[in-house]
Image (tube, rainbow, N blue to C red):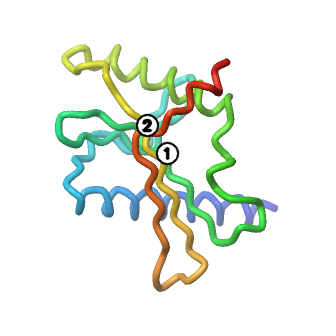
């Protein structure tokens, strides 16, 4: 069990690094990686064209536990919102307008991971 947890953590860390590199190649600027607050963590905080972007990275080796998109629950979304509010409290010089991107990395073929990038995801219905 402990080995599985370490493996998932290592796979997740690899995915976040891979995602940051992928987004930087697209012109995004990395501001924060693994931004921790008491409400939760934002995997990546990026900037593109003046827009702040909170990026949730999901790395999967298989679809045995379902598709990665379904792992963003109401609780996770609300924690991400609260964490971004903390980020803006700590950076009052920034415009508090932000968007959520979800980046899925599927590593079924380890030599060629597949990337699915959802931009400006609207999940406010989860707050209802």
Residue 56: % across, % down: 49, 45
Element type where label 2 sits in the image: strand
User: Relative to residue 122, is residue 8 drawn left or right?
Assistant: right
Q: Nearer the viewer, mark 2 or mark 1?
A: 2
The residue closer to the viewer here, 45 or 97, is 97
| Residue ID for mark 2 | 100
Q: Residue at x 55, y 58 (%)?
A: 12
- The vertical placement of 92 against 13, above or below, is above
Which structural element holds mark 1? strand
**Residue at 74% across, 64% down:** 4
Q: Quadrant of residue 117?
A: bottom left
Which badge, 2 or 1, is on the more N-terminal residue? 1
Which mark is drawn over residue 98?
none
For the N terminus, which image quadrant? bottom right
Between the C-alphas of marks 2 and 1, the distance is: 8 Å
Left or right of 84, for residue 22:
left
**Up-down: is 110 above or below 119?**
below
What mark, if any, has residue 56 been given in the picture? 1
Given contact means CB atoms under 8 Å apart, are the residues at marks 2 and 1 in contact? yes
């Amino acid at each position: 069990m402990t080995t599985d947890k370490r493996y998932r953590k290592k796979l997740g860390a690899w995915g976040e690094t891979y995602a940051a590199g992928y987004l930087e190649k697209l012109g995004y600027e990395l501001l924060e990686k693994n931004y921790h607050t008491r409400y939760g963590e934002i995997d990546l905080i990026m900037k593109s064209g003046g827009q702040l972007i909170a990026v949730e990275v999901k790395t999967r080796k298989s679809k045995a536990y379902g598709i990665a998109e379904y792992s963003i629950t109401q609780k996770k979304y609300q924690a991400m919102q609260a964490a971004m509010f903390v980020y803006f409290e700590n950076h009052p010089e920034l415009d508090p307008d932000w968007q959520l991107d979800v980046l899925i990395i599927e590593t079924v073929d380890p030599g060629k991971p597949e990337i699915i990038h959802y931009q400006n995801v609207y999940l406010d219905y989860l707050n209802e």
